[in-house]
Image (tube, coloured by chain):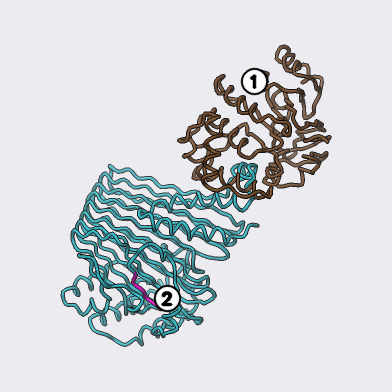
Chain colours: A cyan, B brown
C-alpha cells in the first residue's frame, strides 16, 4: 500500500496562498489567476526533489514571503528617478517602480511607426488583443514560480513590433524596487515581434542593498518568421534580494534571436529560459555572464527545444565565483525527431576564485533525430598560475593581473551582445564589479 | 656594488633540491652568459630570480642594487628593474596585446614614480620599438602570444623588455626554437639595449647565441652551482668539448 505523503506547507507557501488569494478579482484574468493560485497551492515552492530545481531549493532559500508592494509614493518615484543603470544607451525607457508602471518616468511619446507599447491592463481591455494574450498567459507547461507570477498578475507591459518594422532605438524596461522594507514585486512583459521586424529590448532589475525584497518577473517573447529580436538583461538586484525570473520564448522560421544576461545582483537568483525553435532554419544565441561574490547563489537554467529542421543554437555562459558563492548552470538541448540538421552548441565555463565557492554545471542533450550536430561542454577551473606569473613578471600587480584574466574570461560572453552601445555599457558594469573586488 | 649579486643561493621545487649554493655577480654594463647541460638548474635560476611561487628558496641571498629581491613580489621585482625573458612565453587568450603592454608599462612607471603614458605617446613608443624588432602591427592586434610563431613570441619578449626599460635582464634560453634569421633579429634587439647602466644574464645551452650577443663573462653551471667562470673563449671551449666533464666532476 502506498501512503500518500502530504508535504507540510512552509510559512512562505501559506503567506503566498493568503496574500494572493486576497487580491481583488478583476475582469478577464480573474479565472486565470484563481487557477494559477490553486496550481501553486498544489505544487508548493519548487524544492530539491523537483529535478529542475535540484540545486536551488526554494523551500529552503525562501522561508518567508515579503508583503506585497503597494503603489509607489512620490518619494519612491523620486528615488527611482535616480536609477542610472544602462542610462547612456540611447533607449526608450519604460519604468516600473515596485511593480507599478510609472508613466512620468517612462517615455511612450513619438513611438516609431510599427511600434506599439501598452500597459498590460490597457491591453487586456482591448478586445482585439485579449484572446492571444490570454493564450500566452496560460501556457501548457509551466512551473510553480510561473504559477505564482500568474496568480499575482496585475501590471505589465505589452510591446508589439509590426511586420516589417525596424526599431533601431532600444526599448529599456526598468524594474526598480525602492524603499527600506522588504516587499514582493511581480511583473510581466510581452514582446511580440512581427514578421521581418527587428528590435532590441533591454530589461534591468535593480533595488536597494540590505533589503530582503523579492521579485518575480516573466518575459514572454513571440518572434515571427524572419524577425530579428535582441534581448539584453541586467540583473543587478540589491544584495539581500531574491530574484526569480523567466524568459519564455518561441520563434518562427528563419528568425534570429539573441539573448544576453548579466547577473551580478541578488542574494538568491534563478533565471529560467524555456525557448522553442518553432520554425525551420531559425538561429538563436543565448549567452550570459554571471559575477558572484560573498554568499550569492545564482542559477541559470535553459531548455532549448528544437522541433523543426535546420535550427542553429549557440549557448555560451561564463560564471565567475568569488568568496563562498554558488553558481548553477543547467542547460538542456532537446532535438525532436523532425528537427534534422539541427546544429547546437552549448558551453558553460566557470572560474572559481573563492576557495569555498561551488559550481554545479549540468549541460544535457536529448536527441531524437539522427542527422544532427550537437555538442556541449562544461569547464570549472581556477585562475592559471602560469598566466598570473607571466603578467606579474611584467610588473602588473596581483589585483590588476587577476582583473585582466577575469575580464578576458567573461568578456567572451559579453562580446556576444550585438548592439555596441549596450555591449560597452554592460562591459563597464562588469568592470565596476572587478574594481570593487577585494584581493585576498 | 654589483648590480645583481647572488650568494650561495639554494632552492627546491617540492622536495627536489635544484639550486645548491649558486654564487654570481653581474655589474652594470656587463653581459654574463650562463651555460650548462640540461637539468643543471638554469631555468630554475631565472624563475627564482623573477619570483615564481613554485620554487622555495631554502638559503642564500639575491640582491638587485643591494636590495633583497627574494622578499619582493614578482611585480615589485619587475618595477625595481628585473626582467625575465621567458623560454616559453605564455599565451593569454582574451587579453589584447596592446592592453597587456599598456597595463604593464603604466604599472611599472607608476611604481617608479613616473607619470603614466598618454595613449598617443604609448602608441608611438610601441610602434617605434615594434618596427625595430620587425613586429607587425597585426601581431599586436591579437591576444598576447596567441597564434604567434616561436620566433614571434621571442621577439615579443624583447619588445616587452625594451618597453619596460629594466636594469637587469635575464634571458632564459631565448635562442631555443629560433632559426638563424629570427636569432639575428632577437640578438640585434638585445644588443640595442646594451647600456652602461644595464646588466644581462643570458642563459643558454648553446654557444651560437653568444656569437651574436657577445658576453663579457661566461659561467658554467652544473648541478645547481656555478662550477667555472671565464671569458668569452670559455663558450667556444664548451662548444668543442661539451659538458660531459662538468656533469661528472660537479
Q: Which residue is mark 2?
A: A81
Q: CA distance from mark 1 to mark 2?
A: 68 Å
Residue A262 percent coordinates (x, y)? 44, 60
Residue B54 percent coordinates (x, y)? 69, 42
Residue A306 percent coordinates (x, y)? 28, 53
Chain letter behind tag 2: A
Q: Which residue is mark 1?
A: B212
Q: Measured along the vertical axis of the image, is residue A32 above or below residue A266?
A: below
Q: Main secondary structure of the magenta part?
A: strand
Q: Residue at x 49, y 58 (%)?
A: A430
Q: Nearer the viewer, residue A114 or A17?
A: A114
Which labelled disc corresponds to residue A398? none
Q: Is residue A249 left or right of residue A291?
A: left
What residue occupies the far top of the structure in this picture?
B240
Query: Label 1's element?
Result: helix
Q: Is residue A417 magenta?
A: no
Magenta region = A93-97
Q: Nearer the viewer, residue A329 or B131?
A: B131
Q: Quarter holding the C terminus of chain A?
A: bottom right
Amino acid at each position: 500500500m502506498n501512503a500518500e505523503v502530504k508535504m507540510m506547507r512552509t510559512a512562505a507557501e501559506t503567506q503566498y496562498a493568503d496574500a494572493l488569494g486576497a487580491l481583488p478579482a478583476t475582469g478577464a484574468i480573474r479565472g486565470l489567476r484563481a487557477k494559477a493560485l490553486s496550481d501553486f497551492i498544489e505544487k508548493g515552492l519548487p524544492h530539491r526533489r523537483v529535478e529542475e530545481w535540484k540545486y536551488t531549493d526554494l523551500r529552503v532559500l525562501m522561508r518567508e514571503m515579503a508583503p506585497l508592494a503597494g503603489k509607489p509614493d512620490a518619494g519612491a518615484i523620486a528615488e527611482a528617478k535616480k536609477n542610472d543603470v544602462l542610462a547612456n544607451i540611447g533607449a526608450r525607457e519604460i519604468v516600473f517602480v515596485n511593480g507599478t508602471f510609472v508613466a512620468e518616468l517612462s517615455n511612450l511619446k513619438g513611438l516609431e511607426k510599427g511600434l506599439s507599447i501598452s500597459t498590460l491592463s490597457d491591453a487586456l481591455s482591448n478586445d482585439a488583443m485579449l484572446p492571444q494574450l490570454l493564450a500566452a498567459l496560460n501556457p501548457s507547461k509551466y512551473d510553480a514560480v510561473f504559477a505564482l507570477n500568474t496568480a499575482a498578475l496585475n501590471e505589465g507591459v505589452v510591446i508589439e513590433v509590426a511586420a516589417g518594422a525596424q526599431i533601431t532605438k532600444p526599448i529599456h524596461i526598468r524594474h526598480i524596487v525602492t524603499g527600506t522594507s522588504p516587499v514582493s514585486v511581480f511583473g510581466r512583459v510581452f514582446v511580440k515581434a512581427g514578421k521581418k521586424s527587428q528590435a532590441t529590448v533591454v530589461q534591468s532589475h535593480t533595488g536597494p542593498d540590505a533589503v530582503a525584497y523579492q521579485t518575480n518577473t516573466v518575459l514572454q517573447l513571440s518572434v515571427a518568421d524572419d524577425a530579428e529580436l535582441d534581448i539584453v538583461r541586467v540583473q543587478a538586484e540589491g544584495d539581500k534580494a531574491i530574484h526569480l525570473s523567466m524568459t519564455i520564448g518561441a520563434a518562427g522560421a528563419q528568425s534570429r534571436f539573441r539573448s544576453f544576461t548579466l547577473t551580478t545582483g541578488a542574494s538568491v537568483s534563478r533565471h529560467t529560459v524555456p525557448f522553442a525553435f518553432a520554425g525551420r532554419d531559425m538561429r538563436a544565441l543565448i549567452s550570459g555572464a554571471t559575477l558572484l561574490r560573498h554568499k550569492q547563489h545564482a542559477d541559470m537554467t535553459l531548455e532549448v527545444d528544437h522541433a523543426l529542421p535546420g535550427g542553429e543554437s549557440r549557448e555560451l555562459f561564463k560564471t565567475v565565483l568569488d568568496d563562498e558563492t554558488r553558481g548553477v548552470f543547467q542547460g538542456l538541448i532537446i532535438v525532436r525527431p523532425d528537427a534534422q540538421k539541427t546544429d547546437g552548441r552549448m558551453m558553460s565555463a566557470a572560474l572559481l576564485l573563492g576557495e569555498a565557492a561551488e559550481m554545479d554545471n549540468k549541460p544535457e542533450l536529448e536527441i531524437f533525430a539522427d542527422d544532427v550536430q550537437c555538442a556541449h561542454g562544461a569547464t570549472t577551473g581556477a585562475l592559471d598560475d602560469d598566466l598570473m606569473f607571466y603578467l606579474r613578471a611584467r610588473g602588473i600587480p596581483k589585483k590588476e593581473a587577476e582583473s585582466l584574466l577575469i575580464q578576458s574570461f567573461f568578456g567572451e560572453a559579453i562580446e556576444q551582445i550585438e548592439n555596441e552601445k549596450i555591449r560597452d555599457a554592460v562591459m563597464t558594469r562588469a568592470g565596476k564589479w572587478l574594481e570593487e573586488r577585494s584581493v585576498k | 656594488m654589483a648590480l645583481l649579486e647572488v650568494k650561495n643561493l639554494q632552492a627546491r621545487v617540492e622536495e627536489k633540491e635544484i639550486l645548491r649554493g649558486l654564487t654570481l655577480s653581474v655589474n652594470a654594463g656587463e653581459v654574463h652568459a650562463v651555460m650548462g647541460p640540461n637539468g643543471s638548474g638554469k631555468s630554475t635560476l631565472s624563475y627564482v630570480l623573477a619570483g615564481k611561487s613554485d620554487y622555495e628558496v631554502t638559503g642564500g641571498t639575491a640582491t638587485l642594487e643591494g636590495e633583497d629581491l627574494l622578499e619582493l613580489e614578482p611585480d615589485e621585482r619587475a618595477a625595481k628593474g628585473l626582467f625575465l625573458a621567458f623560454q616559453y612565453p605564455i599565451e593569454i587568450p582574451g587579453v589584447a596585446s596592446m592592453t597587456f603592454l599598456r597595463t604593464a608599462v603604466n604599472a611599472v612607471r607608476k611604481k617608479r614614480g613616473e607619470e603614466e603614458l598618454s595613449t598617443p605617446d604609448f602608441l608611438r613608443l610601441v610602434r617605434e620599438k615594434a618596427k625595430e624588432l620587425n613586429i607587425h602591427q597585426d601581431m599586436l592586434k591579437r591576444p598576447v602570444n596567441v597564434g604567434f610563431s616561436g620566433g614571434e613570441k621571442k621577439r615579443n619578449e624583447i619588445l616587452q623588455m625594451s618597453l619596460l626599460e629594466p636594469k637587469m635582464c635575464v634571458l632564459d634560453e631565448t635562442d631555443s626554437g629560433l632559426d638563424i634569421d629570427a636569432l639575428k633579429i632577437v640578438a640585434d634587439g638585445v644588443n640595442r639595449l646594451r647600456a652602461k647602466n644595464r646588466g644581462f644574464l643570458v642563459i643558454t645551452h648553446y654557444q651560437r647565441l653568444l656569437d651574436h650577443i657577445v658576453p663579457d663573462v661566461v659561467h658554467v653551471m652544473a648541478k645547481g652551482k656555478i662550477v667555472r667562470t671565464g671569458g668569452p673563449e670559455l663558450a667556444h671551449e664548451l662548444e668543442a668539448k661539451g659538458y660531459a666533464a662538468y656533469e661528472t666532476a660537479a
